[in-house]
Amino acid sequence: MIIPLHSSPLSVTGHPIDGDRLVRIVLVDEAGISRDDRVTIVAGIIVDVDKQWRMLEERRQSLINQYIPVGDRPGFAFHATELFSGGSYFKRDQWPLQVRLEILKRLLRIIKDAKIPIVVGYCFKSEDESDKKSAQLRHALAYCGLLTGAEHYMRMLKDKNQVAMIIAEDTSQKKNLLKQAHFLIKTEDPECFEYLPRFQPSTKIFGGLQFAEKKDYTLLQLADACAFVFRRSLARLSHAENLRARF
């Protein structure tokens, strides 16, 4: 999927794009986005659509074929939280923890085997954080960290004409959080940028937010797994390092 950019589009930070071929997508998901969470994570995988998309999807589908009954396979989506804790599909009395963790590890192994770049932004909850705005700022800071990583990766590519586009899960909560983060970035909110002295305007990440459901943009399930594992690792929760080692 190489899309020539004939106009003069702007980046996610509202600056001119440096490049004319939309080749890569950054599939993004979040974890730890409630007010009570100790750390907020925004994680993403950078996928070359032409070279990697089909292979990644075939690996994901192979995992479904191995574990999920035939009648449940159409439109099936893995969710890392449900795999770890059990849920509406992966009921604890039917799916032992060992089996659920094995599926999650194999989902993570897809990323490692394909050598897919992972970018992560995070922000710890401050001791004096007490209101909704502080939680939104924490998410915006984590998102800026992800943008910085993705921007750096794109600038390091040999093909300087390549640019990327961000796609996130289509839920009302995540939409609102990402739109708020974009507003803080584009308006260069001083409260946000006070904590981001190294943040640079983007010239490689195509502007505008794209949203999709996990069952439609199936590789978002891999981004979901990344966000889940990195949050557990930074919060020092159980099984974190064992899962992270699968990267």
Image (cartoon, rainbow, N blue to C red):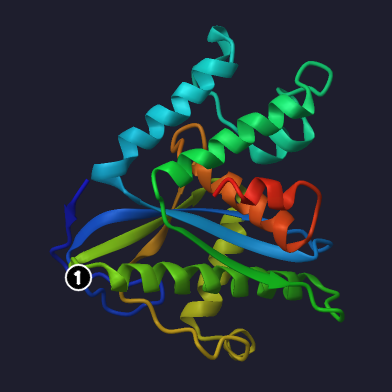
Give coordinates of residue 47: x percent, y percent.
36, 50
Q: Is residue 27 left or right of residue 78?
A: left
Q: Nearer the viewer, residue 129 or 158?
A: 158
Residue under pointer 1: 160
Q: Is residue 202 left or right of residue 177?
A: left
Residue plotted at (30% across, 54% down): 24
Residue plotted at (53% across, 73% down): 144
Residue plotted at (83% across, 77% down): 129
Quarter of the N terminus within the rendering? top left
Question: Can you say whether 202 is above or below 225 in the image?
Answer: below
Give coordinates of residue 236: x percent, y percent.
79, 59
Asked whether residue 221 is in view, the answer is: no
Question: Can you say whether 38 is above or below 114 in the image?
Answer: below
Instruction: Look at label 1 and name its amino acid.
Output: Lys
Callout 1: SS: loop
Q: Is residue 241 left or right of residue 46?
A: right
Asked whether residue 234 is in view, the answer is: yes
Give coordinates of residue 130: x percent, y percent.
86, 75
**Local crowd size for mark 1, using a 10 Å CA cut-off: few (<14), some (14–19), many (≥20):** some
Q: Nearer the viewer, residue 195 or 60?
A: 60
Dividing the picture into quadrants, the one containing residue 67 is top right
Give coordinates of residue 172: x percent, y percent.
61, 49
